[in-house]
Structures are given as C-alpha cells and as structure tokens.
C-alpha cells in the first residue's frame, strides 16, 4: 500500500514541477486524481478531516455502503478459545481451521474489532441489488461458524451501530480557511490553470460535504498498517503465539481480511522474476526478493491459506503504520489498501484472549497442567447446562458441591434432586425430604391433562418396568374423570379403585406408601431459596426413587418455564443415571437459557443420553477413572490418546489432598485440570 501512496505523491510532485515550466500542465492533476481515485480521494479527505469516511446507511440492523456495494452485519463476541492456554502448534491449527472453514473469497470481508474489553466481528458481503436472500443465507452460514469459535452475545441493532460509528456530517469551519490561501498561491504560481485546478478539486469535495457524501466518524482508529511483512517470513508457531500474547495488550485495533486467490500465482511469478534477476542482472539486488517469495510459496504448499489483510489501530503498533490516511475511510472501504498475507499471520491479530477472569459470573475451577488458574464464566456459555461424569469414589458429588458453593456466591440458585441426601451440608441449602413434603404430582402444572397423564404413565412404566402403558393411561383418565385431584393421597386412592390390573394396583400402593406421611407443598415455596430435595427415605426402593425423581424434575421444569419467576436457577440431578432413559431429559437440555434455567447432570455413566444431547451441554467435567470407564466415554467426547492417558492416571480426591483430576470441556475447548475442591 505504501508504495502506491508514494507513487501518487511522487507523480503529483512531478506534475507540479513540470507545470512551473508549462503552467497548463498543472491541470494534469485532475486526470491523475480520477485514475488513482481509490487512493487519492482518501488521501485528500485526510487533509480535510482525519476521521473522514464515506456515507454509510444504517437500516434493518445492517450497514450499507452504497458506493462500494457492500452490506455489513456486526456481532458482539466473547472467545471460546484462549491462545495463552494453547501451544503454538495448537493455536496455529486453530487459526488455519477457522479461516479455512470461513471459505473466504473476494466478495467476503471479515473484521474483528477490539475496543478495550469489547470484541466485535463484522461480516461484509459485496452483493447486487437483488441478492439479499443470498446474502442472508451467507451471513447465517458464517454466523454458524463464528458460533463454534466465539460466543455470539448479540447481533448489533440500529442503535448499537449508530453509537459504534458515531457518524456526523463534515462542516466547513474556520480550520478550512487555509484553502483560500492555497487557492491564491496556486493562482500566483500557476496562473489561471492553477486556479482552475484547485477550484475543481475544492468544488468536488465541498459539493460532497454539502450533499452529505463525506462524513466524519468517531471510530477510534487513527493509524493504518502500510504492509504485511510477516507474509514473507518463515516465523515458527511459538513465536507467532508470543506475538499474539503481546498484541493482547493493545486496547483498540481492527483486523480486516478476505480471500486472496491470486497470491499463489503472484508468488510463483515474482519468485521466477527474482531468480531471473539473480542470473541476468545484479545478484545481490534480487537475492532477498527470491527468498521472500520462496517463503510465501513454501507456506502455501504447507497448507496455509492465502489472504489479504489490513490492520487499523488507535495508536501506532509499530514502525510500519501511517496516519496519512483517514483510518475510518479504510475501515469502510478497505479493499484498495489490503496487503498480501497468509492464514498464520492472523495468529497475531485474532482476539482469542481470556475474558472469564474479570466477570462477575466467573467461578473458579482449579488449575491446568501448567499451573495456570482455570475459571469459567457462566455468562459466556450458550446455556447453563452441565454434566459431571465419573466412577464411584472419584469425587462427582464433592465436585458438584464445590461448584454449588461458588455458583451460589454468583447469585445462581440451585435446586438439587438428591437421591442420597448428600447436599444439605452445603452452606445455605435447605433440605426437603419427600417422605415428609411432596408436591401434588397430579397437578397439571401448566400443561394439558392429556400431557400430564402421558408423563405420569411413562414414569410409572419406565420406573417399575411395567409394559402396560395403555392400561396406566386408562387408569389415570378414569382417576381424573372424578374431578380435580386435590393431593397425592386422593390421586393414589382413585387409581387403586379404578384399576383392573393387580400388578398396577401393587405399583400404585407402593407409591402411596412411600409418600403416605408427606404433606403437600407448593412449588412457589420450593424455588424461593436454594434447596435439596432428598429421597433417602425411599432409597431402599430404587424404582420408587426413580419415579418420584421424574415427577419432581418434570414439575420444577414446567413451573419455571411456565412462569416468569426471574433470576437464574440451576436444576441439579445427582445420580442422573436413574432418569437418563426418560425421553423428557433430552427435552430439558434443549434451549432453556431464555428462561434462566440450567440443567446439571451428575452420573456414573452416560447411559441412554444421546450424543446430540451431550453436544447441547456446553460445560462438561470428565473425572479420571479406570480404563474401562474412560474407554466408555472416549468416543463420545473424541478423546485423544493424551486425554485418555490423563484420565486413566486415577487417584481419588482424598489421595490428592482434596483435588480431583479431570478434563474440563467447554464447547470445543478442552483443558486437563486439577479441580480444587472445597472442604466437606
């Protein structure tokens, strides 16, 4: 880019010098400006206003640049990956994979904007007037890919975009008065041709200002990268990662990139030209050019993707930055000013940086293998669903109790389905024993009678292994036909009275006996404070335990989703293998974020939980254990050999001084961790 600017400046100077001998020659400035408009217009705009940019139209949550035919959409992001916790090789592979999956071409511009702690992405598409449907499909495709590497907090709306751009009209003020002096000087030096030339240029820009063609922006960028010298260097992955970590300290910058299908052919052409220069002309002059282009060819052959990129910043990041051009103009129309590059060059600029440590919703987990602290920001996860899996004795319940204590300090309220009564010891959690207090499981709870009958029937059939679903439904329909069922005793009594099946009568009787001494309670009372619902009084009957757990889970889930209860709640299901085979569990882990409800499953085995449901759980802790257990989860989580070695080196927490060896998986990010457990 800098060479072109220098060439334009040199050409203008040459015209001015020649015009001293032949004054009409000064008018050659006008066609020169027309031919080099892509560069000369922003160059001259920079003389008027260093924050100048072309007019942008903000409408329907898009930014339109009519002059370039580009439509832009913006997102607020948080990174899922942290380059400081990755090896150089791993980070390079991540960046290359990300760029490859974007499938960039000349019509797509991707930008990442860092402004303090805020990170945004801009996707720009060059489209024809009638291609909006195609543009929306392309935007959605790129958005899905972004969502696998970043948490998309929101798409910026019209108000957000206006605040970000800070567009205002350029007005002629006293600071533009030197134009009069310049015009007079041109008249003195070049006569009438000089006056005509300066009048033409000034009229063009003044008319543009008057018509609102040129505007000023509050974008925080002042400097522009002149060229990307990194493309010609063979820098190793660890050095690029180190540059990335150093770059994380820069508060305001923007990197813009797109595909560059011509670079491979250009590199070969320039390499052969340099080699020819070595042979035919002066060897020393062309030797380093040959090395530079050879490096580009080697990097492309090794799998790097050719790109074009541009970096803007608030302050000069290095000596290769200029402020001769208005950076906001280049932000809007970067195509003419981008430099050749390769995908690994983006390792320096992509904002894969830690954000969770500073958030109020961050909870401490422990430390990774290198001793770095590991925190998790619950706000950055797509939802609050979680899963802890591990064999007996390896710290599942202890880990969950530790997380609960830390989550409660962040105003996230737990409701624990606790088969063995182990969570009442967590400070601030009250205990409800189902043999003393029980919800009315026959209450419709915001769903239809048919749906409630179906759910109770499925619970009975699954829990007691009774293959008589039609008979159970018939019994329930007859029970409900007698009018509102006021409590569990009433409902069980009706079922036993109407059933013609001795097996089912026995099942109904067992359920009734288990909760015979319980008083009815309302769910309003349950969700008002952290609570553990314990089933230890019926633990001797696993089938009864399973059935009652299913009823509590279903009613709590339905209550929170059907009422705007406010706040954030976590429904924790310990010994979840009891209920994983129920079809509703998969329903529960799909899309409850907007209701402020997360589901946390603690289990010895994944059992009937489908891979699709596992993929919808963004927070996973895999505790260490024996070989057969690790083998059972390896394929589900795509564990590497190193992951398997880490998990099979198993000792219980008591032997590790109150720590649990585990893998922490947050979306695509995996960490080998030692969980720091709270004292019991």
Image (cartoon, helix red, strand yellow):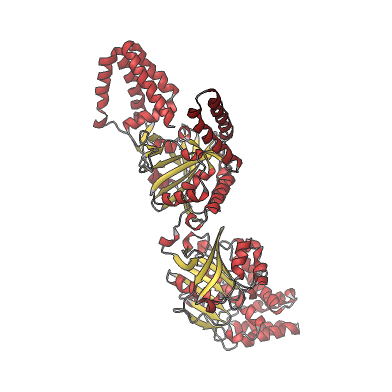
Would you identify the image quadrant in which residue 634 lies?
bottom right
**Image point 57% across, 41% down: which residue?**
299
Question: Where does the image place residue 255, in percent across and percent down from the top left?
Answer: 45, 43
Asked if 28 appears above or below 597 in the picture, the reply is: above
Which picture quadrant has residue 326?
top left
Which residue lies most toward the top here?
22
Q: Is residue 135 left or right of residue 409?
A: right
Q: Is residue 562 visible?
A: no
Q: Nearer the viewer, residue 59 or 249?
A: 249
The image shows a total of numbered marks equal to: 0
Residue 343 screen position, x and y as percent: 54, 43
Which quadrant: the N terminus? top left
Quarter where residue 222 is shown: top left
The correct choice, above or below, for 68 with respect to 481 in the image is: above
Is 198 or 139 nearer to us in this picture?
198
Compared with residue 142, is residue 65 higher up or lower down, i.e. above or below? Answer: above
Q: Which residue is pictured at 43% across the width and 41% down the height?
A: 311
The front one of 439 and 362 is 362
Q: Is residue 377 visible?
A: yes
The residue at the point 33 percent across, 35 percent down is 50
Image coordinates for residue 348, horizontal then vertical, percent? 47, 47
């Amino acid at each position: 880019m800098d060479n072109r600017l220098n060439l334009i400046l040199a050409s203008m100077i040459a015209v001015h010098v020649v015009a001293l001998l032949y004054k009409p020659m000064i008018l050659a400035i006008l066609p020169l400006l027309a031919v080099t408009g892509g560069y000369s217009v922003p160059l001259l705009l920079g003389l008027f206003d260093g924050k100048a940019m072309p007019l942008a139209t903000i409408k329907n949550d898009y930014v339109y640049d009519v002059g370039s035919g580009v439509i832009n959409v913006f997102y607020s992001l948080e990174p899922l990956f942290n380059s400081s916790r990755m090896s150089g090789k791993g980070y390079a592979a991540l960046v290359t994979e990300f760029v490859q999956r974007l499938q960039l071409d000349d019509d797509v511009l991707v930008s990442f904007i860092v402004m303090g702690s805020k990170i945004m992405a801009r996707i720009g598409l060059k489209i024809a007037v009638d291609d909006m449907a195609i543009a929306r499909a392309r935007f959605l495709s790129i958005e899905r890919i972004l969502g696998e590497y970043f948490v998309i907090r929101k798409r910026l709306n019209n108000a957000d975009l206006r605040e970000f751009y800070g567009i205002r009209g350029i007005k002629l003020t006293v600071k533009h008065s030197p134009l009069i002096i310049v015009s007079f000087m041109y008249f003195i030096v070049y006569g009438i041709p000089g006056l005509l030339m300066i009048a033409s240029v000034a009229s063009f820009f003044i008319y543009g200002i008057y018509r609102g063609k040129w505007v000023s922006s509050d974008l925080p960028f002042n400097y522009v990268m002149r060229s990307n010298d990194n493309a010609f260097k063979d820098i190793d992955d660890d050095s690029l990662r180190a540059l990335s970590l150093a770059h994380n300290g820069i508060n305001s910058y923007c990197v813009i990139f797109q595909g560059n299908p011509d670079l491979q052919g250009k590199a070969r052409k320039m390499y052969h030209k340099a080699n020819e220069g070595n042979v035919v002309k002066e060897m020393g002059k062309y030797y380093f050019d040959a090395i530079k282009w050879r490096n580009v060819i080697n990097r492309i052959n090794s799998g790097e993707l050719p790109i074009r990129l541009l970096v803007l910043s608030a302050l000069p990041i290095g000596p290769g930055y200029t402020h001769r051009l208005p950076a906001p103009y280049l932000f809007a129309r970067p195509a003419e000013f981008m430099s050749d590059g390769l995908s690994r060059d983006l390792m320096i600029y992509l904002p894969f940086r830690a954000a969770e440590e500073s958030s109020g919703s961050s909870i401490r987990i422990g430390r990774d293998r290198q001793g770095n602290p590991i925190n998790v920001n619950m706000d950055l996860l797509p939802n609050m669903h979680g899963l802890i899996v591990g064999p007996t004795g390896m710290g599942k319940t202890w880990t969950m109790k530790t997380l609960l204590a830390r989550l409660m300090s962040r105003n996230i309220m737990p409701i624990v389905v606790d088969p063995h009564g182990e969570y009442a010891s967590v400070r601030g959690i009250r205990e409800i024993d189902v043999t003393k207090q029980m919800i009315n499981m026959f209450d419709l709870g915001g769903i239809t009678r048919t749906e409630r009958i179906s759910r109770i029937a499925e619970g009975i059939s699954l829990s007691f292994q009774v293959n008589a679903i039609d008979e159970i439904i018939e019994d329930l329909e007859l029970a409900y036909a007698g009018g509102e069922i006021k409590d569990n005793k009433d409902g069980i009594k009706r079922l036993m009275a109407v059933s013609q099946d001795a097996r089912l009568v026995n099942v109904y009787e067992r359920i009734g006996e288990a909760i015979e001494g319980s008083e009815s309670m309302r769910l309003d009372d349950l969700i008002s404070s952290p609570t553990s619902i314990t089933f230890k009084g019926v633990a001797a009957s696993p089938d009864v335990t399973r059935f009652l757990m299913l009823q509590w889970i279903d009613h709590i889930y339905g209550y929170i989703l059907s009422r705007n209860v406010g706040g954030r709640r976590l429904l924790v299901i310990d010994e979840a293998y009891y209920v994983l085979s129920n079809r509703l569990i998969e329903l529960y882990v799909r899309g409850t974020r907007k209701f402020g409800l997360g589901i946390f499953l603690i289990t010895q085995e994944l059992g009937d939980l489908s891979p699709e449901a596992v993929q919808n759980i963004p927070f996973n802790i895999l505790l260490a254990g024996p070989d057969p257990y690790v083998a059972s989860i390896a394929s589900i989580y795509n564990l590497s050999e190193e992951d398997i070695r880490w998990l099979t080196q198993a000792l219980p927490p008591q032997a590790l001084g109150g720590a649990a060896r585990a893998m922490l998986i947050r979306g695509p990010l995996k960490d080998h961790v030692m969980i720091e457990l709270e004292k019991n």
